[in-house]
Image: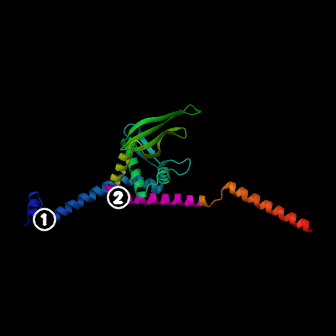
Amino acid sequence: EYEGEKVLKRLGFTKTKEVFDKMFLEYEKIIDEKNQKLLPLFNILDSGKSSSAEHKELGDIIIDVGKTGKSGYGLKHIIEQRYKKDGKSADKITALVCLIQDVLKDGKAKVKSTFVDSDNLETKHYEIEKNGILAYVSSRRFGKEEKFLLTGFESKDKNKEAEDAIKTVIAQYDYTEGFSAIRTQVGAIIASIENKLADSDKKVNPEEEHRNRSEAMKGNQNAKKRRGSRG
């Protein structure tokens, strides 16, 4: 028997196959735990139904699929902004979204701004940070107290820490079904954004359209004058 087998027997394994079986079971357990951790995010993006994360101090924070555009918020807003503004890949955006879920659970929170509306209702905007990743949360929605995710991105002051956190998530989760499924969803949202951008590029600029109409009207008037002079 070879030296490695002697070591294995001393550890309680009588056959090498037992080692591989045990390792495989441990591997499956780890993969399952990682997939379970990402499941809420997948469900939000897949179904459009909101979920929540329980922060240690702030309590429940609603995570919505949200929407893109000027009044955007939630996961779609995060994906849109990080793609359009930062030029991030689907892998990095997926990792960022996964990190934001962690931030909402045990990041360090502080009140970033407070304002009072015409009904004298106070709304607080919280900044929550962990590993250089920031999440912004509002304390009120439609006049009711309800904490929900507005947006999230990397801290400029802790950019390297944030980038390292993103790389770590990719390295640890890239091979899991959960990460792959969320990345596919992120890719679909990016594709939708690109289609909208392409459509907007095709539209004529309002000033140019007005100028074209003016030129056309002048052309018609000149044509009428020429016909009148011949009549």
For the residue labelled by badge 2, is the local secondary structure a helix, a strand or a loop? loop
* Circles 1 and 2 in contact, beta carbons < 8 Å: no
Name the mark on residue 93: none
Q: Nearer the viewer, residue 157 or 56?
A: 157
Q: How many marks?
A: 2
Q: Quadrant of residue 228?
A: bottom right
**Mark 2, residues whose alpha carbon is within 10 Å: few (<14), some, or many (≥20)?**
some
Disc 1 target residue: 15
Q: Amino acid at mark 1?
A: Lys
Magenta stretch prevailing secondary structure: helix
Left-right relation of 94 to 5: right
* Residue in the image at 13% along x and 65% along y: 15
Q: Distance between the Cα atoms at labels 1 and 2?
A: 32 Å
Looking at the rendered image, the quarter that the N terminus falls into is: bottom left
Vertical comparison of 13 with 98: above or below = below
Of residues 115 and 18, which is closer to you in this image? 115
In the rendering, at what x and y percent does residue 111 appear? 45, 35
Residue on which the image places disc 2: 174
Magenta stretch: includes residue 11: no
Residue 196, horizontal then vertical, whole percent: 56, 58
Q: Pinpoint residue 149: horizontal percent, then vertical percent.
A: 46, 44
Q: Is residue 53 left or right of residue 71?
A: left
Give the structural element (helix, strand or loop) at label 1: loop
State the residue at coordinates (23%, 61%).
24
- Residue at image location 83% in from the left, 65% down from the top: 223
Boundaries of the magenta span: 170-199
Residue 9 drawn at (x, y percent)? 9, 60
Q: Give the residue type at disc 2.
A: Asp
Q: Quadrant of residue 61?
A: top left
Name the N-terminal-most of marks 1 and 2: 1
